[in-house]
Amino acid sequence: MVQVRPFRAVRPPAAEAARVASVPYDVVSAAEARSLAAGDAASFLNVIRPEVQFEAGREPAPEALHDAARRAFDHLLTEGLLAESPHPALYLYRLTWQDHRQTGVVACCSVDEYDAGVIKKHEKTRPDKQEDRTRHGLAVGAHVGPVFLTYRSKPMIDELVAASTEVAPWVDFTAPDGVRHELWEVRESAALEAAFAAVPALYIADGHHRSASASGIRAALRRGNSGHRGDEPYNRFLSVLFPADQLRILSYNRFVKDRLGASPEAFLAKLRQDFEITFIDDPSSCAVGRVAMHLDGRWFGIDLGEPPEDLVAALDAAMLQDRILGPHLGIDDPRTSQRIDFVGGIRGVGELERRVAARPEGVAFALAPLPMDDLLAVADAGRVLPPKSTWFEPKLRSGLLIHRFEAATGSTEASR
């Protein structure tokens, strides 16, 4: 069963939380990160995207970037913009965006459970990216970004969370993107820990590389620790656990940069040989089994046809790839092809229209959001989703809560 552990969080003072906290490292480009950090040494982007400390166009070696991340982290500690709590605790983290609200439990989860598959995956990781995240974590001595986990909801956990959020939050601010972030500290956490012990499995919603790097960090530190016991802080990693029924998955859309030279009329005629296609006004109206295509300034609805019996092959992203992107557009491997871009649903269908307008030889496809039950079923089966199948929104902020497994002195006594 699932273990969740309280920890001594490294965190900003409540009054500085909005200034220190940043977007996650993997949702912005280097240029966007520089703009957001804007030379502010208090921004946590200096830790998770240390290239903001270097001139644009300069490409430091990975070791230089990781060293810069550690210096930035130490600077925040020295300046009092981050400090380690003296008390182990769990935390509750609520995000409110437009009409949507979700509340999760911030805890340390077990690397052993990740390695054993109790914490389940739904996508592959890239070895180079995983190694980079491992080296970054070892350099900083901390898990600086939480892994976004989910679980099938339990009434007991819901009740405990609701009771603990009846008081005023410790942190409460609205970020520039309009997302409200609230945090509560839970020092008396035994009831929550016991309630999670009845949860049979956790699922990675977002953060596969962070999870894999936590395993890599543990392996590296274990090799260097002749007295390894199994209860050291590096055996756990920072996570936020949300009930699945509170989460919101947005579409993850596709833009193909060219149609292999086919005119709009020829491409449409070729597709009509295999699919039922209609003109539509609202691309967001497409449901599971039906995608919207933007071509030559117009939107079309495409019925993908009868799904196969295979669990993964029957998903819209897989059918779009197998039936249109591969055979009609030559996108044989969407993971490596330079001719396809993936566009997160937060940008809306307007972004697809903009891209086609800027590149008329291209074509865009909007998909319905993946149902949460499909994600859980794929993970339960030990399978992986097609690439870029899920876009979760709102995003967690980095820098609000950090799990330090190695202090600046080299000690690993940073959490319970």
Image (cartoon, helix red, strand yellow):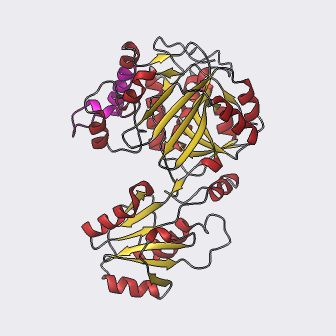
| Residue 56 falls within the magenta-colored stretch | yes
Whether 359 is drawn above or below 280: the answer is above
| Residue placed most toward the observer, 317 or 102 | 102
Residue 179 in the image: state x and y as whole percent: 44, 42
Whether 62 is drawn above or below 371: the answer is above
| Residue placed most toward the observer, 389 or 80 | 80
Residue 210 in the image: state x and y as whole percent: 52, 38
> What secondary structure characterizes most of the magenta part?
helix
Quarter of the image where one finds residue 195: top right
Region in magenta: 49-73
Total of numbered circles in the picture?
A: 0
Quarter of the image where one finds residue 308: bottom right
| Residue placed most toward the observer, 59 or 297 | 297
Q: Is residue 194 left or right of residue 170?
A: right
Quarter of the image where one finds residue 238: top right
Q: Is residue 309 left or right of residue 104?
A: right
| Residue 61 falls within the magenta-colored stretch | yes
Q: Residue at x 73, y 24 (%)?
A: 190
Q: Quadrant of the N terminus?
A: top right
Asked if residue 162 can be seen in this view, the reply is yes
Residue 115 in the image: state x and y as whole percent: 65, 38
Residue 51 in the image: state x and y as whole percent: 30, 34
Q: Quadrant of the C terminus?
A: top right
Q: Residue at x 42, y 86 (%)?
A: 270
Q: Residue at x 41, y 22 (%)?
A: 15
Asked if residue 339 can be seen in this view, the reply is no
Q: Is residue 44 left or right of residue 168?
A: left
